[in-house]
Image (cartoon, grey):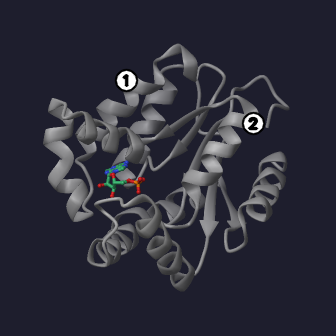
């Protein structure tokens, strides 16, 4: 990262509770990259009571995915802003193969492509323990146990195919996400510097 003139466009993949959000915040603030958390954008829309928020609230509360068309539109608009010029950390997008293809197309128009995909590897037990801790701390309305299980199921069904999709493209790197924040961050930096 930062070795070539290309701006970094980094995609974080992994199940809910893998720690993507925490690592994305840390990486983007330390490397001055634009952190794009689609989940945070949607939760902010719900909290503000905007039209978008009203449209997505039920979907979020049920742990389902918002439609590809809407997500693609939101991300396309977001990455066109100047604060994204230094580079992107995409946290929570793409989440389907359709979104991944659309991201590729968006970047192609500026002669770019994703520079790294990082898969946060973590066991199902760790994921469940972390989600339980998070719902206690943050009181996220989509973090009841039933919804958590649904989000894990949907991850397996809709998002996990992206691992193979990006593996085929030779872009996928794996980070052991079982450790504490600092340990995982150190492993993340090491992985990114290998690119
Ligand atoms: P997250 O904070 O990334 O776990 O996202 C929270 C919720 O926002 C998800 O459970 C989905 O309902 C919705 N969401 C976030 N990103 C996407 C996306 N790329 N595609 C569809 N739905 C999304």
Q: Which quarter of the rendered picture does the N terminus lie within?
A: top right
Residue farthest along the bottom direction in this orientation: 125
Residue 28 position, x and y percent, is 66, 37
> Residue drawn 27% across and 63% down?
63
User: Is label 1 in a helix, a strand or a loop?
Assistant: helix
Vertical relation: 180 (above or below) 128 = above
Residue nearest the observer in this picture, 165 or 42: 42
Counting the numbered discs, the total is 2
Vertical relation: 140 (above or below) 24 = below
> Residue drawn 28% across and 60% down?
141
Badge 2: few (under 14), some or many (20 or more) residues near its Cα, within 10 Å? Answer: few
Residue nearest the observer in this picture, 84 or 112: 84
Residue 62 position, x and y percent, is 21, 64
Question: Alpha-carbon distance for marks 1 and 2?
Answer: 24 Å
> Residue drawn 48% across and 21% down?
109
- In terms of sequence position, does the residue under pointer 1 or pointer 2 come before the other? 2
Badge 1: few (under 14), some or many (20 or more) residues near its Cα, within 10 Å? Answer: few
On screen, residue 51 versus residue 150, left or right, reads left
Q: Are marks 1 and 2 in contact (CB under 8 Å)?
A: no
Residue 90 disc label: none
**Do we see residue 93 in this rendering?**
yes
- Which residue is disc 1 drawn over? 77
**Do we see residue 16 in this rendering?**
no
On screen, residue 125 versus residue 140, left or right, reads right
> Residue drawn 27% across and 45% down?
68
Vertical relation: 177 (above or below) 126 = above
User: Is label 2 in a helix, a strand or a loop?
Assistant: helix
- Which residue is disc 2 drawn over? 30
Residue 3 position, x and y percent, is 85, 32
On screen, residue 106 versus residue 7, left or right, reads left
Q: Quadrant of residue 114?
A: top right
Residue 188 position, x and y percent, is 75, 55
């Amino acid at each position: 990262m930062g070795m070539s003139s290309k701006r970094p466009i980094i995609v974080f993949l992994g199940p809910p509770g893998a720690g993507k959000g925490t690592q994305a915040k840390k990486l983007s603030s330390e490397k001055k990259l634009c952190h794009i958390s689609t989940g945070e954008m949607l939760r902010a829309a719900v909290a503000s009571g905007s039209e978008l928020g009203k449209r997505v609230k039920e979907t979020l509360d049920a742990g389902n995915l918002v439609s590809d068309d809407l997500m693609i539109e939101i991300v396309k608009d977001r990455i066109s802003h100047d604060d994204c010029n230094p580079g992107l950390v995409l946290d929570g997008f793409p989440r389907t193969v359709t979104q991944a293809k659309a991201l590729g197309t968006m970047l192609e128009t500026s002669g770019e492509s994703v520079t790294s995909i990082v898969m946060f590897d973590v066991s199902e037990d760790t994921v469940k323990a972390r989600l339980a801790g998070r719902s206690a701390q943050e009181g996220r309305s989509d973090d009841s146990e039933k919804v958590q299980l649904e989000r894990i199921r949907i991850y397996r069904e809709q998002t996990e195919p992206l691992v193979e999709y990006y593996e085929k493209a030779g872009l996928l790197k794996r980070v052991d996400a079982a450790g504490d924040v600092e340990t995982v961050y150190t492993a993340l930096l090491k992985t990114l510097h290998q690119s």
